[in-house]
Image: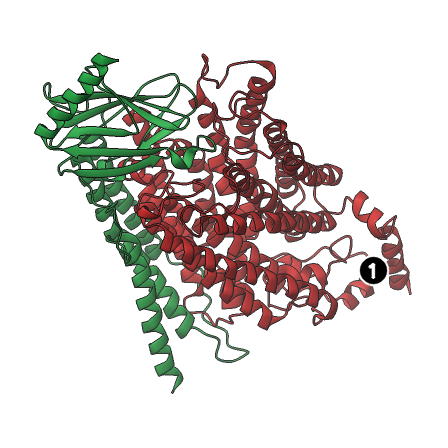
Amino acid sequence: MSLKIKSIISLAVASAFTFYLFVSVTYSPSAFALPFEFRTPESPNAINMNNLYNFISFPAAFIFLVFELSLLYVVIRYRRKSPDQMPKQIEGNLALEITWTVIPFIIVGVIAGLSFAELQNDFAAPNFHLPKHNVLYINVIGRQFYWTFDYPNGVHTVGTLVVPVDTYVRLRLSSPDVIHSFWVPNLGPKIDAVPGYYNYTWFKALKKGTYYGQCAEYCGVGHYDMTIYVKVVSPSYYKQWMAKQLASLKKA
Amino acid sequence: MQAEALLERYKTTEEPQYGGILEWLTTTDHKKIGIMYMVTGFSFFLIAGIFALLMRIQLATPNNHFVSSEVYSELFTMHGTLMIFMFLIPMLTGIGNYLVPIMVGATDIAFPRLNALAFWLVPISGILVLSGFLFGGAATAGWTGYPPLTESQYTPGVGMNLWDVGILVTGISSIMAAVNFLTTIVALRAPGMHYLRMPLFVWSMLSTSLLFLFATPSLTAALLLLLSDRELGTHFFSNHGGYPVLWQHMFWFYSHPAVYIMILPVFGAISEIIPVFARKPIFGYESMVLALFGIVFLAMGVWAHHMFTVGLNIYVESFFMVMTALIAVPTGIKMFNWLATAWGGAIDFKTPMLYAFGFLATFLIGGISGVYLSSVPVDTYLHNSYYVVAHLHYVLVGGSVFGVFAALHFWFPKITGRMLDERLGKLSFWTFFIGFNLTFMPMFQLGLDGMPRRIYTYPSFTGWGTLNLLITCSSFLIAFSVLVFIINVIKSLRHGEKASNDPWGGNSLEWVTTSPPPPFNFYRLPIIRSRRPAKDPQPSLEEVLASVGEHK
């Protein structure tokens, strides 16, 4: 096989390999079936974050492919052919340098601009443009090593948050001990529970189901086990469940 | 006759006072100190690397209990702490220590005794930090040490204090080294070595030194305040009237510039290596210098991008987001300029050049993943997940460590007078490159799949087990590669081919002198007429000796 054909084959294989790596990183679903589809956003803010991520992947893929394929081209085309070979001594090129200053500047500018807009839309704590009525306000406490949820009517749960589907839920978080972080990937951003002040986040689950999350700020030896289950149920189920909770509260 | 007598006089006055170990313990010669920095750094690299392998065994399968959760916390804390403070920073300081005086045409660094002190503080601080294992447990709160977890109420025990003091000491050491580099570069350049003729490696050490000076005091202050909280009952960061987030500001004000401290010398080394093996001058020298200063300036203003989930005001977050996004611009300029240097060249892929290209291929991925993380909304998903672990290893291993190996292979002949074995070099490169990518690329996926950082184990229903097993197996390929490198070094020190002054066809002044250089670096002030003084006509040793005694 001639060197030329070998080069073309290795270029093709290497490109395919790097392209597979890059695509497998940026796009869901993963190659292995997951019982929890963590990457599927199930709340409007999560959907917007996911869209922003996907948007960034376009310029990211562009820069990645241009650079890596150029690198591969250099490796094949510009090998030294003889011991005394001396190439053209180029010191620079202003036009090229301006191009690869301005284009990245524009790319990151657009990404920052879209991100700034999303911050205004979904991240303006504590009220988040939420409606005035039909919002479920939950107080969340993270402590070593479990989460507790307090409902407005006094109901208290540990580890599992039960909410009705299609309902805005606003969480107020804090901690009495060390810093923890509340993260349910399907339902939006993570937010820290910090001793000394309150943090806020929100979600609106669009589909029924159970969503899994974990503490995302190292908080001690039990950090790995600080699990969160968000059970999103129908309004009727939620009513029944709440009635049962209130009944057992009264008994206690 | 007169020339020979003079040479004899040089030899005897510069001959070390002591022999053997005592010489190394008392030396103030920047070359010996540089070697000690490098050897010390590499030793901590091996220790921290073993900790990483132990962590990977623990994470290989769900619900594993290879070590306890407490031990696992010690492992990830010490892995990060050692790799950053005891490996990368000392190793790069050592390479700089060896090369900067020679590259500017000086006979030693500006303050030799300060240099020795700065070095010896490093093994001392490493021992302090590690000694926690002997005194009831090493530090366990991550290399970031966030209070209130690191307050004495939640992490009692002296291991945390030893960690605190150890890092304090090494910070002081780095400030001393920075003062030495800056003074050497400003005051000791040989005639003809104008600023804009200096090698880019020297510019990178200058920039790194500025970052050391601006940033380290913040960490030193934070560590003192934490120590005070732990031992004197103050409440700077506690949950009883303190402000835990203040630690994060003070810590990251240093630690973000710290990551640039760990990459800028590597940028400098790559800027030396690619032109040599491509036989072309560096593309855009002036922009490369400007980009370094752009990075220094921006690096000081991005620290809170590590804090996008603590509850900062969205306008404050936006400022840091914009600064972080902007830093991609000067970094991108450097990447494209390196590519343009190699483009159209006549490239010989000796091991240093392989590592340089490995650096370019992997640091790019680290940089691009950083752009995702710079967007606040996206970061609130990715923060503290394995996506960040992947990103940081792509920049610190794919970037800094590949760069360190490129530099070690490139300057080994100069430092030791022996060539490294090319075949072992190529083997170590390819196993490192493949092992590294197989280990860290899947971590991007794991992060997107919701796996947080610093978890001891995970349930099998998450589905994270498959990729974790792949990662663990691949990490042993990295270990193999490092073993090959060690064998290469040992073998070459004993039987390596003797190195000439300039085995690679270099551009900077170290290639003008012998391999290794004499104690005073040069037999005669080198002639400097361009950015590539090794290619300016230099007198031979015979001509130098023949001219002694003539008043020219």
Residue B364 appears in the figure: no
| Depth check, front residue: B528 or B123 | B123
| Depth check, front residue: B87 or A229 | A229
The quadrant in which residue B248 appears is top left
Q: Colour of chain A?
A: green
Check disc 1 and give the amino acid type: Val
| Residue B200: x %, y % from top left | 53, 51
Question: Quadrant location of the N terminus of chain A?
Answer: bottom left
Image position of B135 (left or right of B310) = right
Q: Residues within 10 Å of mark 1 (few under 14, many from 20)?
A: some
Residue situated furthest front in the rendering: A251
Residue B303 appears in the figure: yes
**SS under mark 1:** loop
Image position of A186 (left or right of A133) = right
How many numbered circles are shown? 1
Q: How is the image coloured?
A: by chain
Where is B380 relative to B33, above or below? Answer: above
The chain letter under disc 1 is B
Q: Colour of chain B?
A: red
| Residue A130: x %, y % from top left | 14, 24
